[in-house]
């Protein structure tokens, strides 16, 4: 299952968001997520001429459009103060950013939502921190761990960790892509993550550098990427099925 991460790549520009939303509503993708940053982050970029922050009414507008079109919209969070402004809105799911993986006050708010929660494991999120986060939710239902390697080196993606996390914590494990090589997703298919978060960027404007530029895919690349991934996924499933058949035949003999 793919999740498109608009993140903050819209620059707070509603025209950019409209491009993303128009694509999303017509696409085969069913899930999209936006991101809340900290007040410090927003203030820092306002001084540089960028207002990344979206107001509560506009988020509610996005929720209503997605609901009307039977699509799901989520929110990535890392800060209690900025989340407090929109916490009563009815998002379909939430992503807990890795920088706040042990922010237990924030986790308590997310718990009360009783919605699917995706726990990102990017920055310094070792097994001990992951365990604390899971324990603080008091329940495992609706929890998914996201393997989130923050690297542009394909050799350091360590997809095997998906298997290890799944076995250790007995939870669904997905993947959050922060790699610039989209072909790595075809390799990822062998590990069958339960969810895949893909950063996206709207338009091919000259000299436009998005906040998550290097590891984001343009909208016109997404459907091809998905088809390629599904093709590889099917081939892996066929290999597994053939192995089971072979083993069964040997037992019969």
Image (cartoon, helix red, strand yellow):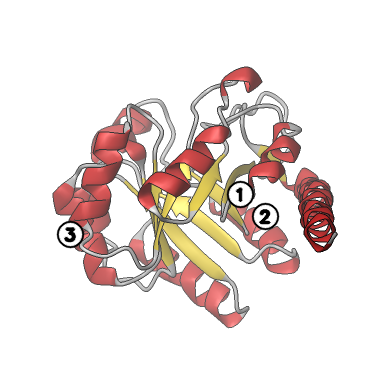
Q: Earlier in the sequence, mark 3 or mark 1?
A: 1
> Which residue corresponds to the image point at 74% horizontal and 65% vertical from the top-left?
28
Quarter of the picture containing the C terminus is bottom right
Front residue of 207/35: it is 35
Residue at numbered disc 1: 16
In the picture as drawn, the residue positioned furthest to the bottom comes out as 68
Q: Is residue 237 visible?
A: yes
Figure check: 146 above or below 27:
above
Q: Is residue 11 left or right of residue 56?
A: right
Front residue of 253/159: it is 253
**Where, by quadrant of the figure, is residue 126 drawn?**
top left
Residue at numbered disc 3: 108
Total numbered labels placed on residues in the image? 3
**Where, by quadrant of the figure, is residue 138 drawn?**
bottom left
Residue at numbered disc 2: 19
Q: Earlier in the sequence, mark 3 or mark 2?
A: 2
**Structural distance between the alpha carbons of marks 1 and 2:** 5 Å
Badge 1: how crowded within 10 Å, few (<14), some, or many (20+)?
some
Q: Is residue 253 left or right of residue 5?
A: right
Q: Is residue 209 left or right of residue 48?
A: right
Q: Position of residue 2 (x, y in %)?
A: 63, 55
Q: Is residue 10 visible?
A: no
Badge 3: how crowded within 10 Å, few (<14), some, or many (20+)?
few
Figure check: 29 above or below 162:
below
In the picture as drawn, the residue positioned furthest to the front comes out as 253
Q: Which mark is residue 197?
A: none
Mark 1 touches mark 2? (CB < 8 Å): yes
Q: Secondary structure at mark 3?
A: helix
**Structural distance between the alpha carbons of marks 3 and 2:** 34 Å
Front residue of 246/27: it is 246
Q: Secondary structure at mark 2?
A: helix
């Amino acid at each position: 299952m793919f999740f498109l991460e608009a993140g903050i790549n819209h620059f707070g520009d509603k025209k950019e968001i409209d491009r993303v939303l128009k694509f999303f509503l017509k696409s085969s993708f069913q899930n999209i997520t936006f991101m809340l940053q900290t007040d410090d982050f927003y203030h820092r970029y306002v001084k540089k001429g960028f207002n990344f922050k979206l107001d509560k009414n506009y988020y509610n507008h996005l929720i209503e459009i997605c609901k009307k079109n039977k699509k799901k919209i989520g929110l990535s969070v890392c800060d209690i103060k900025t989340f407090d402004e929109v916490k009563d809105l009815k998002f379909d799911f939430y992503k807990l950013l890795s920088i706040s993986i042990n922010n237990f006050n924030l986790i308590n708010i997310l718990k009360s939502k009783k919605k699917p929660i995706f726990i990102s494991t990017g920055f310094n999120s070792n097994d001990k921190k992951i365990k604390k986060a899971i324990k603080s939710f008091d329940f495992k239902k609706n929890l998914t761990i996201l393997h989130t390697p923050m690297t542009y080196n394909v050799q350091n993606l360590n997809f095997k960790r998906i298997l290890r996390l799944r076995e250790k914590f007995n939870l669904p494990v997905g993947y959050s892509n922060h790699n610039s090589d989209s072909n790595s997703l075809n390799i990822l298919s062998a590990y069958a993550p339960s969810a895949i978060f893909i950063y996206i960027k709207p338009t091919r404007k000259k000299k436009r550098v998005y906040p998550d530029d290097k590891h984001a895919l343009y909208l016109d690349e997404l459907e091809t990427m998905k088809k390629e991934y599904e093709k590889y996924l099917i081939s892996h499933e066929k290999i597994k099925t053939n192995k089971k058949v072979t083993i069964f035949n040997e037992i019969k003999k």
